[in-house]
Image: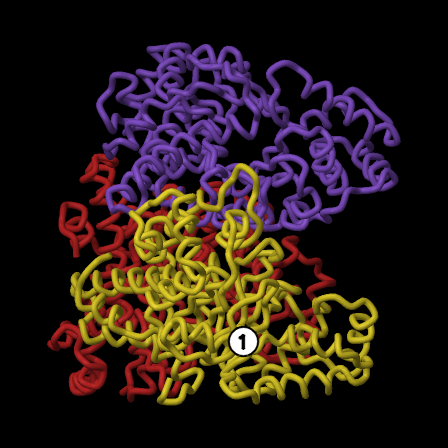
Chain colours: A purple, B yellow, C red
């Protein structure tokens, strides 16, 4: 890691991780760990350790388990098992030096730590992000008729966001339909008709009219809205997750809620454009950071920042499942942003006070401002 | 700024800025300046100075106003006001060391310097680019019936391009419809029908058939056609401004007029592809240069040049409103291209004579060739 | 070229070039050479030598013809003519140090060396890739009725792939229709109807239903399928050659054949995403390597490798026509990958044994595995 005053500022700063998930607390065998290491399944003959993320884990996480750098995968997993999940999670979560964890609690195919336990292990505070598709699917599971869906969903969403500690909502529309949607708020009749189809069929919410309705319900809720954009697992159609497709909708909702574009890669420049021209748009490059690893995080951040106003970049790890990703995401962010800013200071392209300010903004203050975090956080 | 023979060549070279606008001559308060500094509006709590362009202004423009590098925004604006617009514009325009200014006169929501005054302040020569949408809208404002629209537009465009000093035309189809258009020349009947709709409704020209007709009228005019591509203000739907969508049309017009793709970011590689495979296609990365600032201009130029024939890259500032952008655009271009070429010379990947030739071509000679500029220019 | 153990490993490694074409054996005048140097036509006043590829030829290929680095184009071509095609081809092909050439024999508007002669000149072994569009067009030329097309095409394809030395098939669907196709296997009735249209019209195969049928026939053949993606000559609609459009089809064919995404630029990140989330997807950045030249090959490789599992990157030159591209592709690959990996080793981000393994995998072993190359190869 480079050194200099900007790096020191970022090292001392408690991050606000505005989008993350819980971690598993049970034991993980090699296939189980490899599956979480990649954003999908593990394949025979193609180890997840043989990826940029896998190399980064062996390089940067092994020493946190008292192993040599670049420890072999089996050695790594044996040591991980010997220490036990609680100690492993404590080490990686505290290594992230994160003051606030905003946890998306709506995706848990595996049992995951609840936000409070996560924050306790990491020495920080937990806040919650409500995933709206999960709310809608719970409404459907509890039973509702098509004509009552809109009201029931809105009521359930309001209940969910009024719980203590909830600071925002999230949509995975990128996975369900992509962003190439009619931007207009659907009529009540259209919602009822679409609900009739979906409720008859069941399954996850991927009906385009209902996804539009969900996004507009987010506007009514009034809280910041996180949107998954860009890459994820193989459920994504990447070109339909290009956030540029949101432009018409962003025009329609101008003056309402903040919209936070998550991940963005490989469309970080498209996201930067939106953040530069829409007052309500923010972005991060979470998820990307641990998948590309510390070696490439700077390049992705450089592209994300080419035209982005410095008030618009946030930090997230988007860590999920394995606590390594908390440590790696924070490391990649601190090093990538630190190197980028310090080099500009060293080249006299940016003043040091400005660089320190940008570092604090991106690492914590922008999130505090957007989510109106109370002082205690 | 790096140093070396390529940098010296570019420092001595009088640029041809093949696409720019006028500058304001009146006083600018902080909101007025901030609004021009970003490509849109200024927002409460998110200063336009806290952007890559804002940092670049404080770093590189402040010294030209006799201030320290990285001067605070208020200090900068106070000094700017004290010197007065005329002196400020003279300083930044002469700092750009530009021999020829090709001025797009068709966009002036604010009062702007006419080309002659701009060139006088910058110590260069003014030429003019006619914006075809403005010509069409003037025809509509003067009154025309749908059946006479095509002839009236063509006659008005011919009148406009026959004015002394006009060397090209421009279209902002990217803003109005995007490029995902039927590439064929529309029939007379289609044009009349579309004109009937548009003339009844009024407002700016954004009727797809009429935009196609405009592009084909440009072909008939026979002058080089500039096309805004890629990013701009929030009127753009970025993905529809990807110049790759022009491919079918470029096939149809092969052998007619030169087409100059302006700005291009973040699609500079797509633009480079078109410049590599179509004889008539050229590109620049104007606008981008001052928005990303001198720190990132090299990267954008590197991508733009990955496969672009060296005869195909031009320089433009796309400066508009504030004269800082003339100075910044020229600085970012000279430094970015100079560093890129000099490093290749230093690594023995490019001979020095070749590097000097490429620098002169991109900075001036390619534009002179495409626009057939007389020797005096 | 950088130096270090990774560079030495790559220098000693005999590459597997999993996708290339033959070279011309006749004399080439300047227009003929310039036309092959660019991926299209040569234009008056815009020499193909004034491109990144042209500069790379003068820099890196001239010395292999006993000329000074950066030799002028005319000097270069005179020396090339004096040595004669056989000697020139021998020099460049052996400079590529390629052990296995997988030759696409389906595109030969010019007379080209057959695979065996190519491999002999290069000191390696020849294998063959069958281009399926050429098979389909041969079936049409020999005469078939619409109802018999599907069976005749399948039989001809089976005959073609059963020839000795055939290890894979290829489709240029990117050129013919792009990838924005209905992903489902077309019905027999649809194929017959489409064949009726195409056979009546003749010409190259660009009927969307038949292209889909061709891709599904490739699945039935069971061999690895190469897909041209991203840039090529001006027949491409670049945005429709974005491999992300293949996602739905890749879901449908999961568990069947390996799919190798060729070239990819400027969509190397999109290709990397597919390689990261689909077990059967692989990629290379062939063609790109010699067009961007050794100076930029590293950047393209860095982007291609941001999230790609190390088992998924292959080497190809995609050399065609002039043997310079064999030498340049191999040089750009060895240097780009060598610099990238060695710098990570030097920064202690990657262990040396891991780096050497990744180099061997990408340069040869991944291809040996995917194509199940016999030990002799």
Q: Position of residue C362 (x, y in %)?
A: 30, 49
Q: Answer with the quarter of the image where residue B132 lies.
A: bottom right
Vertically, is C280 above or below A41?
below
Q: Residue A204: x percent and y percent?
A: 70, 32
Identify the residue at horizontal 21%, vertical 58% (top origin). B2
Q: Position of residue C150 (x, y in %)?
A: 64, 65
Q: Nearer the viewer, residue B94 or A219?
A: B94
Q: Horizontal placement of A283 versus B313: left or right?
A: right
Residue B198 position by quadrant: bottom right
Q: Is residue C298 above or below residue A357?
A: below
- Residue at the farthest front position: B82
Residue C341's quadrant in the figure?
top left
The one nearer the camera, B122 or A153, is B122
- Give the residue at x 53% y 43%: A230
Q: Residues within 10 Å of mark 1 (few under 14, many from 20)?
A: some
Helix, strand or loop at mark 1 = helix
Which residue in the structure is indicated by mark 1? C138
Could you tell me residue C38's position as x and y percent? 36, 75
């Amino acid at each position: 890691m480079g050194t200099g005053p900007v790096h020191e500022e970022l090292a001392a700063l408690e991050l606000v991780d505005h989008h993350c998930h819980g971690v598993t607390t049970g034991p993980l065998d090699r296939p189980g760990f490899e599956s979480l290491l990649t954003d999908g399944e593990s394949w025979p003959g193609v180890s997840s350790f043989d990826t940029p993320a896998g190399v980064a884990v062996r390089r940067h996480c092994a020493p946190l388990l008292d192993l040599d750098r670049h420890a072999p995968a089996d050695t790594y997993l044996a040591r991980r098992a010997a220490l036990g999940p609680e100690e492993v999670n404590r080490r990686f979560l505290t290594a992230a030096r994160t003051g606030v964890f905003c946890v998306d609690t709506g995706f848990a195919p595996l049992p995951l730590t609840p936000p409070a336990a996560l924050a306790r292990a990491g020495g920080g505070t937990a806040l919650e992000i409500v995933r709206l598709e999960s709310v809608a699917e719970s409404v459907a599971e509890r039973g509702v008729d098509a004509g009552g869906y809109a009201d029931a969903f809105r009521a359930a969403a309001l209940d969910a966001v009024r719980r203590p500690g909830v600071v925002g909502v999230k949509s995975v529309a990128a996975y369900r339909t992509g962003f190439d949607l009619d931007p207009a708020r659907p009529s009540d009749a259209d919602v009822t008709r679409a609900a009739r189809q979906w409720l008859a069929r069941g399954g996850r919410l991927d009906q385009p009219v209902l996804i539009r309705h969900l996004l507009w319900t987010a506007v009514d809720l009034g809280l910041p809205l996180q949107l998954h954009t860009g890459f994820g697992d193989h459920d994504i159609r990447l070109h339909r997750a290009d956030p540029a497709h949101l432009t018409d909708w962003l025009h329609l909702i101008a003056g309402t809620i903040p919209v936070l574009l998550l991940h963005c890669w490989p469309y970080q420049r498209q996201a930067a454009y939106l953040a530069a021209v829409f007052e309500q748009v923010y972005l991060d490059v979470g998820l990307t950071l641990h998948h590309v690893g510390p070696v490439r995080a700077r390049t992705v951040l450089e592209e994300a920042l080419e035209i982005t106003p410095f008030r618009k970049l946030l930090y997230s790890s988007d860590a999920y499942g394995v606590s390594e990703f908390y440590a790696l995401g924070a490391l990649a962010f601190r090093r990538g942003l630190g190197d980028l800013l310090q080099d500009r200071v060293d080249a006299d392209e940016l003043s040091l006070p400005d660089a320190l300010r940008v570092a604090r903004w991106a690492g914590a203050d922008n999130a505090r401002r957007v989510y109106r975090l109370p002082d205690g956080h």
